[in-house]
Amino acid sequence: MARLKSSAELEAFREAIVNQRDTDRPCVTICSGTGCRAYASETLSTAFEEEIKKQGLEDKVDLKTTGCHGFCEKGPLVVILPGEICYVQVKPKDVAQIISQTVVENKIVDHLLYTDPVTGEKAVHESEIPFYKNQTRLVFGNNSKIDPKSIDDYIVLGGYSALSKALFQMTPEEIIQEVKDSGLRGRGGGGFPAGRKWQECRHAPGDIKYVIVNADEGDPGAYMDRSLLEGNPHSVLEGLIIGAYAIGSHVGYIYVREEYPLAVENVFIAIRQAEDYGLLGKGILGSGFDFTVKVHRGAGAFVSGESSALMTALEGRVGEPRPKYIHTVISGVWDRPSNLNNVETWANVPLIINNGADWYASIGTERSKGTKMFSLVGKVNNTGLVEVPMGTSLRDIIYNIGGGIPEGKKFKAVQTGGPSGGCIPESLIDSPVDFDELSKLGSMMGSGGMIVMDEDTCMVDTARYFLDFLTDESCGKCTPCREGIDQMLTVLTNITEGEGQEGDIELLEEIAGVTRDASLCALGQTAANPVLSTIRYFREEYEAHIREKRCPAGVCKALISYYIQPDRCKACLICLRNCPSGAITGGKKQIHVIDQGKCIKCGICFDVCPKHFSAIEKISGRPVPPPPPLEARAIREKKRRRK
Amino acid sequence: MKEISVEIDGRELKAQRGMTVLEVAKEAGIKIPTLCFHKAVSPLGACRLCTVEVIRNGRSRLVTACTYPVEQAIVVKTDSAKVKKTRKMLIELLLARCPDVKIIQQLARDYGIEKPRLKKIKDEDCILCGLCTQVCQQRMGVSAINFVGRGVNRKVDFPFGRMWDECVACGACTYVCPTGHIQNETHRVAQLKRQLGIHRKCRYMLMGAVSNKLCPNNYECWRCEYEQRTEYRLGEHPVLALKLAQRQGGQYMIK
C-alpha cells in the first residue's frame, strides 16, 4: 500500500473501498473480545470457517471477527449481516444450523435469540435487546462493526476523517479551543478538563513534548479501556495524532499493560498499518507533520496507572509516583512537557473534531459532557460494558440496562470507581452519574468500574477486601499510604473477625483522614474512600459487627454459624455427604447435627440443602441452640394406612 | 531572579523562585521536622513528616515542604491544628512499624504520643525513608542497593538479596541512615578484606578517589595511606563530606 499523501487521496481511497464492498453480501461477525474468547469464540470462528467451506459458500459468505460488543454476559455473540440478526451464547454445535438456515435461507434460529428474562420476549436484533436499547454508544458503537486488525474497516466507517480535518482545516489553537468548548474531561478518573491540559502542555516551554495514552487499567472488574483498545485501536490512535498535532508533539507513547495481550497485539498491528498508509510517521497525509508512536508494555503494577508513576515507568524505572506540584504537562517524562490522557479520552477526540464542540457539549450534564463507558459487573443480570450519557441515573444503568439483581435479591449498594471508589447505597440510587455528583457522594468516577452488590454482601468485608487489594498494590513509597492502609486493614480484619472494639470506627476515620490528606499520589489519597463511604452509609453494620458481634449479611465467617433446624431436617443425607470437614453427623432417618467445633463455615451445606426443606440456618449475633438430644433425633415416619 | 514573598507562620519572608518551602523555612530558622530529607540528595517526599498547610489562591491544602516549590505568593502554616494532627498520625504509624527506633520515639514524645494506639505491625528498624538508596544512586552513582518489593513488603536490599560487587562498602548509606538500620558497610569491608591476593578494586578505587592500579599495600587495608590521610582531610569526596556532616551532629532534624 502506497502512503496516502493528501486529504483527497484518503477520501478517494475510502470511496474505493466502500464501492468495493457489497453491503448485501451475507457476513457472519463473531465477537472476539477477551470476554467472548473466554467462552471459546475462537473455536467458534474456526467452526464457522469449516462449515462455510463444507457447504461450499466461500465465495458467497464473509466471516469477520470483531472487537468486544459489550454484552459479555451472553457471549459468544454472533451477528449475521446484512439482517443484523443477533445470536447469543452460540456453541460450535449451532454453527451448521446458523449457516444453513440464517445465512442461506434467511430464517431465524429461534433458540439462539436473546430472551428477556422478565417478559420472555425474544429479540432478533441487537438494538432490540434492552441492554443495548438504553445505551448511547458513541465511542464504543463501532466496536461491533470493525475487525480490529483491519484499518480498512475503520476507514470505511469514516475513520481518520477527523485527522484530515484537523490537519488541513484547523490550526492547533482551533483544535484546542474545540476540545475546550466541548467540555471533554479526562476519563481516567480525575476528570481534569482535557482542553485545558492540552493548552498548558502546548504553552509549556521546551521543544520536545510527549503525548501518552494511559492504557494501564488496573481496577478489579473494569475493562472498558481494554475492550476499546482491543476492538477499535485506530480510534484511540486517531485521537492521539490529533492531540499531538494540537500540542506540538512528535513522539507518542501507548502505555499498555502486558496483561492485555490482545490489546498489545492489536495496537502493534494498528500502528504498523497506520504507518503503511501514511497516517503515522513523517509527513502525515502530506501535511509536513511528523509523529511516531511507541508502545510501552507495563509490567503489572496497579500504581503505574497513576500519571506520574506511569511516566517514571516509561523512563525505565520502577513505577513509583513523584510529587506533582509542578504539573506533568510542564515537567513529565524525562522532565519534558508530557500530556497524558486515558484511552477513552483519546477515543472521544475524533468525535469532537468530526461533529463539533456544540454537538458534544449538548450531551451530558452541565459540568460533565459526553458519554462514559462503565463496566457493569457484580450481582447484576447483564454483565457487560455500558456506554451512557453523563447524568444517567444509577438506577437506569443497573435496572434498565443491567436488568436488575439476579435471583430476585435486593439491591444493597453499588461501588463505583474501582478500589479507590466508594459504595453508594440504595437511598441514593437515583443520583445522576457524573464527575461532581459521584465525588459529592464520597465516591468517584474513577475509570468507570461499577460493581453492583446485593443484600448478601457485607459492607465491612467489602471495605476490607478493597484495602487488602490496595496494601498489595500500594508502591510503599510514602508513609501514610503504606502504613495507613495496612493499619486500616488490620482494624477492619479485627472487626470482621469479631475482635472489634469501641472506638475502632473513629480510629478508622482518623487514619483514613490522614491517608487521604497526606499521601503522595492519588492511590493513597483515594484509598480511604471504601472505608469512609461504607462508614458513612452503613455505620450500623460496623456497629453490629463491633457491639453485637453480628454480621447482618452473614458473610464474615468468624461471626456466623450454621445450624440445622431439627423440625425442618428430613435426614436426606445431602449435606452430610457434601460436608468437606465431616462436621455433620446423622444418618438415615436421623436428624442431622453440625458439630460446631469441626465446622469450617464454608457454607456448602447451606447451598446444597434442598430449597423446599431450607433446614439450614445462618446464625449471627446470637448463640447457636444446642442440638436435640440423641434419642430425639429419630424421624418417625407416618404410617400409611391401607385402604 | 525574581523574589517572591512567602508568609510562613505569619512571618513575611523573601524567597527565590523554585526554592522549596523547606529551604525557605530553614533559612528563616523555622523548624519543620523531617526524616527523609538530607541536603546531599534530592528530596523524595516519602516520609511526609514535613507536611505543612499551604494556602494558594485562597485554597488550603496539605503539601510536603521538602518538595513543594515556591512559584507564587503563598501562605504557609507549619503548625496549624490540621498539620499537627496529620504529623501526629504519621508518627503513630511509624511508631507502629518501628517501635524501637530512637528518632521515632523522640518524635513521638515531642508530639505528645504517650501510649501507642495502633497495633504493632512489624518490629523494624527501617522507616523506608529512602536516604540510603538516594545517596547510593545520586552521590555514588551505582545504585548498589535499592528498594525491593512493593507496598508493605517494601525493603532496602541488594539485587536478589545477595551482596554484589557494585557495593564497595563506601559507607555513604550507613552515614545517612537516620535509624542505624543499614549496616552493610561493616559486612562488606570484612568481605573485601577476606579476598586477599587478587587484583581487585578497593572501595576508594571504585569511588575514583585513588588510581586504579594495583594496591601498593597488597590490599592490606589497615596499611592504607589513603584511609589514614582522609582522617585529616575530610570533605573532598561526597561520602567524606557526608561523614563530616554526620560527625557534626547530623542534619536529620532542622534545628
Image: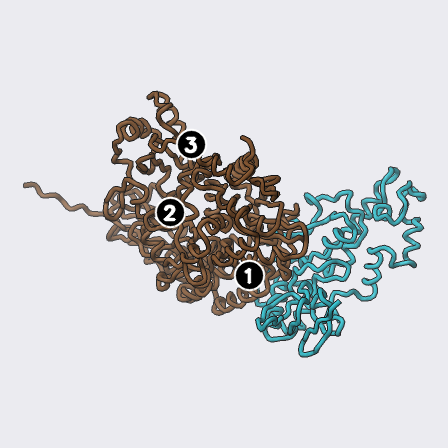
Mark 3–mark 1 Cα distance, whole angstroms, equals 42 Å
User: On the same chain: label 3 and label 2?
Assistant: yes
Chain ID, mark 2: A
Q: Position of residue A175 (x, y in %)?
A: 53, 53
Rendered position, B228 above or below A228: below
How many numbered markers are drawn? 3
Does residue B68 appear left or right of residue A534 in this picture? right
Query: Please, what secondary structure does the residue beneath circle 3 have?
Result: helix
User: How far separated are the C-alphas under marks 2 and 1?
Assistant: 29 Å
Which mark is first along the chain, 2 or 3?
3
Seen from the viewer's position, the closer of residues A210 and A73 is: A210
Q: Which mark is residue A383?
A: 2
Question: What hue does chain A carry in this figure?
Answer: brown
Which residue position is annotated with label 3?
A: A42
Q: Decide if residue B140 is in sight here.
A: yes
Q: Residue A344 at what x, y percent from top left?
A: 48, 49
Kindly identify the amino acid type of the residue bearing the numbered disc 1.
Answer: Gln
Q: Which mark is residue A525?
A: 1
The chain whose colour is cyan is: B
Quadrant holding the N terminus of chain B: bottom right
Q: Nearer the viewer, residue B242 or A166?
A: A166
